[in-house]
Amino acid sequence: MARELIVAIDGPSASGKSSAGTLVARRLGYLYVESGAFYRALGWKVRACGVDPADDAALQKLSETTVIDVVRTSNGAKILVDQRDVTDDLRTPEMSRIAAQIASNPLVREPMLKIQRAMANTGGVVMEGRDIGTVVFPQADVKFYLDADPGVRGKRRYQELAAKGLPVDLQTTIEEIMARDRKDMNRTVAPLRKADDAIAIDSTGLTLDEVVDRMVVAVERRRTAITR
Ligand code: CDP
Ligand code: CDP
């Protein structure tokens, strides 16, 4: 019997991690996990409770007591915070900012690490985020690092937010994702960086299907090597 793999995807904002990760997982019949949703969900709770994201004690208490659930649906997943469906509230520029702010705190990352590792203990998982191949699963079977030009990534994110009817502007969106990338790359704990053994894919001039095809080929190659 072939052992099922752990596939790690990291990269900066709007590099295509969740779109490609979802499709790769579907093609492989694997579970897809978007680790950023956990930071966004806790950020939602921080805001809902009026907690100062810089208040360590309050943040630690919230991260230990908040129950975050991911419920699979036919077209993706619902994110529940203390049983309330907050899925539609998580992908706003404000939630992105709060998520990145609290994600730089080790008191928040420690419990997240446990949850994320537990979700993949049987393999057969595609997990994406910022530190999956470096910290969460340094032994992942296949690692990818997705990237694209900041202007292209900013335009992708802008189009997504505008399609949802959010009041956004292209230049501000580009600046916001670049500021968040800098914050994610320069933090002390679990900074965003390419793992030495990750396969780098620059999707600037690639369609999503082309990216997914490359990733599936790499995973299948590894699967074959393991079963040989
Ligand atoms: O998860 P991450 O923030 O890395 O990016 P995403 O939300 O998956 O992708 C942002 C947008 O770029 C989505 O609307 C994708 O369909 C689009 N896109 C892409 O991901 N890859 C391409 N090669 C072209 C477009
Ligand atoms: O979709 P996008 O790439 O813009 O963001 P996301 O994956 O939802 O992550 C939101 C924020 O959570 C990131 O900017 C990081 O600060 C944090 N994050 C993290 O620190 N580690 C992860 N494994 C995933 C997300």
Image (spheres, rainbow, N blue to C red):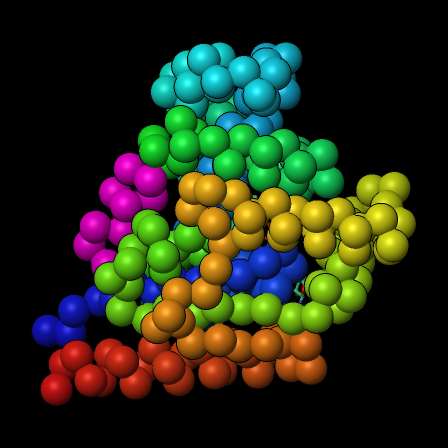
Residue depicted at x 78% and y 66%: 151
- The range drawn in magenta is 113-124
Residue 19 seen in the figure: no
In the image, taking residue 215 as reference, residue 98 lies left or right, namely: right
In which quadrant of the rendered image does the C terminus lie?
bottom left
Identify whether 133 is placed above or below 227: above
In the image, taking residue 185 as reference, residue 112 lies left or right, namely: left
Residue 194 is one of the magenta-drawn residues: no
Q: Position of residue 171 (x, y in %)?
A: 87, 54
Q: Where is residue 158 in the image (x, y as percent from the top left)?
A: 79, 55
Q: Which of 89 and 11 is in front in this view?
A: 11
Residue depicted at x 28% and y 45%: 117
Identify whether 220 is placed above or below 55: below
| Picture quadrant where residue 93 is located | top right
Residue depicted at x 33% and y 50%: 136
In which quadrant of the rendered image does the N terminus lie?
bottom left
Residue 114 is one of the magenta-drawn residues: yes
Residue depicted at x 53% and y 61%: 11
Q: Which of 124 and 117 is in front in this view?
A: 117
Q: Position of residue 224 (x, y in %)?
A: 22, 84
| Picture quadrant where residue 207 is located | bottom right
Q: Position of residue 223 (x, y in %)?
A: 24, 79
In the image, taking residue 10 as reference, residue 169 lies left or right, namely: right
In the image, taking residue 223 as reference, residue 128 lies left or right, namely: right
